[in-house]
Image (cartoon, rainbow, N blue to C red):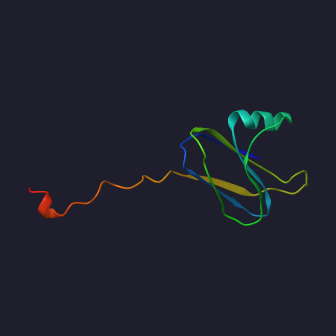
Amino acid sequence: MSYDLGNLKKGSTVVVTLQNQANVQLVTSSDYTNYKAGRRYHYHGGRVTRSPFRITVPSNDHWVVAIDLGGYAERISASVAVQSPPRGFLPPARSAQENPA
């Protein structure tokens, strides 16, 4: 099972909700191609035993979530959502006296 998340910004959070434990891997689209072909690839995640599971996106890229049971023949029930990265701090606040109208 896989979810193509498209282009995500660094700092976004991927939230995976599972019915049962499973292997959850966040991979770039090129690493997903390698994963499907049985070649070496890099991933973020691992065996997830508690849900929901959150992964922070490490860089701007095209991302895919791959979920599997490591060869076991059970049904996978999962959902995936993406939360935008935090906006960061606003500029320092000024009192009303500093902003004459």
Residue 22, position as x, y percentages in the image: 80, 58
Residue drawn 64% across the image and 41% down it? 63
Quadrant of the rendered structure where residue 97 is? bottom left
- In the picture, measured across the screen, residue 96 lies left or right of residue 22, that is left
Residue drawn 90% across the image and 51% down it? 71
Q: Nearer the viewer, residue 74 or 99?
A: 99
Quadrant of the rendered structure where residue 54 is? bottom right
Residue drawn 59% across the image and 42% down it? 59
Q: Nearer the viewer, residue 70 or 88?
A: 88
Q: Nearer the viewer, residue 78 or 93?
A: 93
Residue drawn 18% across the image and 64% down it? 95
Task: Give the number of callouts.
Answer: 0
What is the quadrant of the C terminus in the image?
bottom left
Residue 47, position as x, y percentages in the image: 79, 58
Q: Is residue 54 above or below residue 29?
A: below
- In the picture, measured across the screen, residue 50 lies left or right of residue 6, that is right
Question: Which residue is farthest left?
Answer: 101
Q: Nearer the viewer, residue 9 or 92?
A: 92
Residue 70, position as x, y percentages in the image: 87, 52
Residue 12, position as x, y percentages in the image: 55, 50
Question: Which residue is farthest right?
Answer: 72
